[in-house]
Image (cartoon, rainbow, N blue to C red):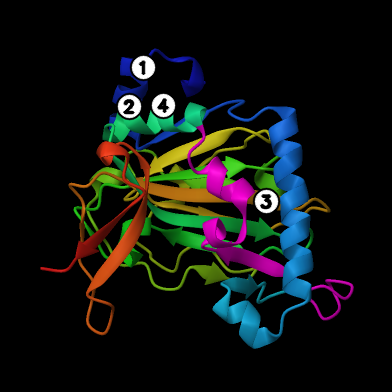
Amino acid sequence: MTATLPAEEKRTFFEEQGYLVLEGMLDEDEVEACAGEIERLHALAAGMSDEERSKGSFQLEPHAAPGAGEGRPVLRKIERTRRHSAVFRDLSAHPRLLATIRLLLGDDLLLFRSTLMLKPAHHGSAHGLHQDSAYWPMEPPSLVTVSIALTDSDPENGCIQVIPGSHKWGMQRWGRITRQRDQPLTDREDVDTSQCRQVPLRAGSALLFHSLIVHGSGPNNSPRPRHTALYAYFPPTVRYRPGEGRPREMTFPVVHGLGGRTELTLSAD
């Protein structure tokens, strides 16, 4: 697998294929600590009102059956996890992870996104094919997204699929990402879904991919959850370009370099 490649070959593989797998990035104790923290965050969400969950960036699974959570909310994802969890804040700056991100992007690194993606057993919805940068106000579209498997991930429970080399297609439109369980991963007839490659991961392994690579994931049809810690990194050469009605400046955490600064505010020109 790509985790065993020398550094220069890793970078070449990523530049050509648009993704990279890091096997065994976390050890068993680290995976267990993340599992415990996910349980804590579920308990935290259970004590919130719908309005509090929304403000706190806790998003419910839209296709869960009534009563599926057995008294707890069935969560689809938690955004801005750094605000809610020291465990997931520290994970975003994990030395083994940053060593590879620095190889791909350089020493100065900012964090664009910090998210938990949760596909609950039997209920996790599909994510349609898309490019991350098609939804992000950042130019040029050259961020690196990292998906860290916190549970074993395979086709049965909805592992990520990528179309190798599709980061070279340029920015395109994709529409709605959340899909019904029986819907295809895209409505576009010009995309050959037979090119999709499933990327199963053992818990503790990570998938890194270019923010323009076309990717998605199927529904969770298994009795096992699929939990993923998702981060997106960028160098300071990427600029903030908000659309109409969005804030004209945004502050991002610094995870490495930039003279030891802890955050950097980027303003629209």
- Give the quarter of the figure containing the C terminus: bottom left
SS class, disc 2: helix
**What residue range appears in magenta?**
65-94
Label 1 crowd (10 A; few <14 / some 14-19 / many >=20): some
Whether label 1 touches label 4, CB < 8 Å: no
Residue 191 sits in which quadrant? bottom left
Q: Can you identify the residue that label 4 sits on?
A: 99
Q: Disc 1 marks which amino acid?
A: Ala
Q: Earlier in the sequence, mark 2 or mark 1?
A: 1
* Circle number at residue 7: 1
Does the magenta portion include 213?
A: no
Between marks 3 and 2, how big is the CA–CA gap? Answer: 26 Å
- In this view, 253 is above or below 27: below
Whether label 3 touches label 2, CB < 8 Å: no
* Circle number at residue 103: 2
- In this view, 187 is above or below 191: below
Q: Earlier in the sequence, mark 1 or mark 4?
A: 1
Does the magenta portion include 71?
A: yes
Residue 109 placement, left or right of 90 = left
Q: Disc 4 marks which amino acid?
A: Ala
* Circle number at residue 227: 3
175 or 231: which is nearer to us? 231
Between marks 1 and 4, how big is the CA–CA gap? Answer: 10 Å
Whether label 2 touches label 4, CB < 8 Å: yes
Which numbered mark, 3 or 4, is in the foreground of this view?
4
Any part of residue 185 in sight = no
SS class, disc 3: strand
Q: Earlier in the sequence, mark 3 or mark 1?
A: 1
Label 2 crowd (10 A; few <14 / some 14-19 / many >=20): few
Residue 23 sits in which quadrant? top right
Q: Disc 2 marks which amino acid?
A: Leu
